[in-house]
Image (cartoon, rainbow, N blue to C red):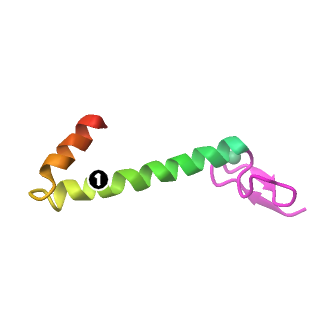
Amino acid sequence: MKTVKCPCCNKAVSWEHNPFRPFCSEFCKNHDLGKWANEEYRLPVEEQDGGNESATEDSTKTKKKLD
Ligand SMILES: [Zn+2]
């Protein structure tokens, strides 16, 4: 039986007949997707904070308050 390690919790999980592959469960799948979505959202905001400070100062401050 072919198995893979769940990228979220490193548990060995069957590749075949696994609707959540490469994850072990729906929980890990949703957790990992949420983690990546969160990181992708945060990184550009931090770059703007240091790079285009003068151009986006107002919008950056607004985002920080909301966050
Ligand atoms: Zn898992």
Q: Residue at x 69, y 53 (%)?
A: 6
**For residue 41, side relative to residue 37 (left or right):** left
The residue beneath circle 1 is: 45
Of residues 47 and 1, the one drawn nearer to the viewer in this rendering = 47
Of residues 55 and 35, the one drawn nearer to the viewer in this rendering = 55
Q: Is residue 21 above or below residue 34?
A: below
Q: Residues within 10 Å of mark 1 (few under 14, many from 20)?
A: few
Q: Residue at x 74, y 57 (%)?
A: 21
**For residue 61, side relative to residue 35 (left or right):** left
Q: Residue at x 57, y 51 (%)?
A: 33
Name the main secondary structure of what is drawn in magenta: loop
Q: Is residue 5 magenta?
A: yes
- Give the structural element (helix, strand or loop) at label 1: helix
Tell me the magenta residue range: 1-25
Of residues 2 and 27, the one drawn nearer to the viewer in this rendering = 27
Q: Is residue 33 magenta?
A: no
- Residue 51: x %, y % from top left: 17, 62
- Residue 3: x %, y % from top left: 81, 60
